[in-house]
Image (cartoon, rainbow, N blue to C red):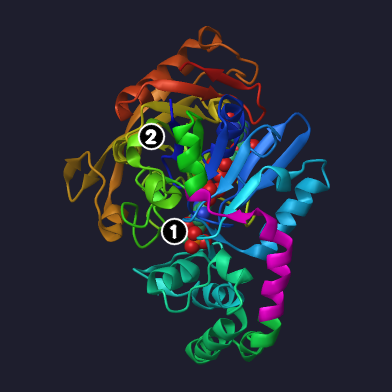
């Protein structure tokens, strides 16, 4: 079993962090390979709650090596804060964390640009990014000329490189950003900031690609931790209301540098309902009391930004699509406890578009916005499931609900989650 991947099948926040933390002891290495500080992965261990943004969710176990790969974009200030937050709680992430020298750095101009253009209306709505500089950093990575990678932080050419980029960025951003923000773009200050980052992180920066190849050669097991969800994938999600990386299963290999042939298990993670943060079409969204009830019971507020998450019923059309896209072998169905308080539950089995029934996710956001969900109604179970520890102990209506979802998305159930804690988990795989 060389590499297992944990992939979100919805719009993020499917509880990937919980699952990765739980699976991690069966692996030698936990790997983050795309996204950046836009991610917020929660791990709950009894009374302790950890919110991880860059650091892989295997970090709580000192035996496991954790790796941040080339496909990740790193905001060093936030990473350093994250590391010291863990250190203040008795964890020593510097001992078992590696950072790729190829990973790109989210620079101060990226944060300014993200804030400046975040409100821009695109396709009738603003994307509502996390303001973590993600899109602008990936844009510069693809554009190449204005990119800074982790290795550059320790390069002798750093100062001249920063001067060149600052010069260009000041004129590029002048029409967009405030004079205060532009004044922040001072080459000398930014160079010394970079030197501080290099000092704080330098001992962890290395060639993670060779490390992972060597691990595979030695028969070690890798656990690949996806960030965001497949519907936010830059190429295959609900574009333009997506993030800037390949957050579905297709991104594992490009982001990490391990070959697709080394991946042998894909675990798709989904909530038993749907949520979305930020703009974009969301056919099953509930803008009523039921949506509010899901939000309050599920504590559906963003881990990274604190924004209320938009809530709705489970969308089997969307998850069937992402399960195929990511080649999911198992479904990890989370937050089942949140649905314990409803007399009936709805699952979207198809859409109605211009009077026609369709069962495929349209590629265009505008078309998806016009789709009306066709629901199947199932009876609720109205019974606390937070103490359930085996499949047999679920109320029969809960089993019917889970089985129906598994049937609709065509993947077997692998994990069931009935609360945030580690022990509130039932493994079937
Ligand atoms: P991630 O980004 O996919 O790792 O997910 P987040 O951490 O952003 O959001 C998931 C939230 O749900 C976190 O607050 C978890 O502690 C919590 N959580 C995880 N599994 C369950 C569950 O089965 N039930 C409930 N009620 N909460 C859960
Ligand atoms: P995890 O890993 C939920 C959303 C943002 C916005 C869009 C683009 O915790 O599941 P970005 O800052 O990436 O340019 O924002 O993507 N988004 C997420 N939503 N969970 C996440 O990560 C997200 N990361 C980005 O809200 O709509
Ligand atoms: Mg999250």
Q: Magenta stretch: dominant SS?
A: helix
Ligand 2 closer than 8 Å to the CB at disc 2? no
Q: Nearer the viewer, mark 2 or mark 1?
A: 2
Q: Which mark is residue 47?
A: none
- Which x, y percent locates residue 411? 34, 25
Q: Residue furthest left?
A: 356
Q: Nearer the viewer, residue 409 or 85?
A: 85
**Picture coordinates of residue 161, whole percent (x, y):** 55, 82
| Depth order, front residue of 251/133 | 251
Q: Is mark 1 within 8 Å of ligand 2?
A: yes
- Work out whether mark 2 precedes mark 1 in sequence or the reverse, and give the earlier one: 1
Is 161 magenta? The answer is no
> Is residue 202 one of those drawn in magenta?
yes
Quadrant of the rendering where the C terminus is positioned: top left
Give the image location of residue 247, x and y in percent.
Answer: 42, 49
Residue 48 placed where, x, y %?
A: 77, 36
Residue 120 placement: quadrant: bottom left
Element carrying mark 2: strand
What is the number of the mark on residue 243? 1
Which portion, as a residue range, is magenta?
A: 191-209
Circle 2 residue: 263
Q: Secondary structure at mark 1?
A: loop
| Residue at 51% across, 23% down | 416
């Amino acid at each position: 079993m060389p590499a297992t991947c944990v992939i979100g099948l919805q719009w993020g926040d499917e509880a990937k962090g919980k699952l990765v933390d739980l699976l991690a002891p069966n692996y030698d290495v936990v790997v983050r390979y795309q996204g950046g500080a836009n991610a917020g992965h929660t791990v709950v261990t009894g009374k302790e709650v950890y919110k991880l943004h860059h650091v892989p969710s295997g970090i709580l176990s000192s035996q496991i090596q954790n790796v941040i790969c080339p496909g990740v974009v790193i905001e060093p200030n936030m990473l350093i804060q994250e590391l010291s937050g863990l250190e203040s709680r008795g964890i020593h992430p510097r001992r078992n964390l590696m950072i790729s020298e190829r990973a790109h750095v989210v620079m101060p101009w990226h944060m300014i640009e993200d804030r400046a253009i975040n409100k821009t209306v695109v396709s009738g709505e603003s994307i509502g990014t996390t303001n973590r500089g993600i899109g602008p950093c990936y844009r510069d990575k693809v554009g190449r000329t204005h990119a800074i990678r982790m290795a550059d932080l320790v390069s002798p050419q750093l100062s001249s490189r920063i001067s060149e980029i600052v010069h260009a960025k000041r004129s590029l951003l002048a029409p967009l950003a405030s004079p205060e923000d532009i004044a922040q773009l001072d080459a000398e200050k930014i160079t010394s900031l970079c030197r501080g980052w290099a000092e704080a992180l330098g001992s962890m920066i290395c060639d993670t690609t060779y490390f992972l190849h060597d691990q595979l050669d030695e028969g070690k097991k890798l656990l690949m931790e996806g960030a965001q969800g497949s519907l936010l994938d830059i190429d295959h999600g609900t574009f333009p209301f997506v993030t800037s990386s390949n957050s579905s299963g297709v991104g594992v290999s490009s982001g990490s540098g391990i070959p697709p042939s080394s991946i042998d298990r894909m675990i798709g993670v989904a909530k038993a309902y749907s949520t979305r943060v930020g703009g974009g079409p969301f056919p099953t969204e509930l803008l009523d009391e039921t949506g509010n009830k899901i939000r309050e019971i599920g504590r559906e507020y963003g881990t990274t930004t604190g924004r209320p998450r938009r809530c709705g019923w489970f969308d089997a059309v969307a998850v069937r699509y992402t399960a195929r896209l990511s080649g999911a072998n198992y479904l990890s169905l989370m937050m089942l406890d949140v649905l314990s308080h409803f007399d009936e539950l709805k699952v979207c089995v198809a859409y109605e578009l211009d009077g026609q029934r369709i069962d495929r996710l349209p590629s265009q956001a505008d078309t998806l916005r016009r789709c009306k969900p066709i629901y199947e109604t199932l009876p609720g179970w109205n019974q606390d499931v937070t103490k359930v520890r085996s499949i047999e102990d679920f109320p029969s209506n809960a089993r019917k609900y889970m089985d129906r979802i598994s049937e609709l998305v065509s993947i077997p159930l692998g994990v069931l989650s009935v609360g945030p804690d580690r022990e509130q988990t039932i493994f079937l795989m």
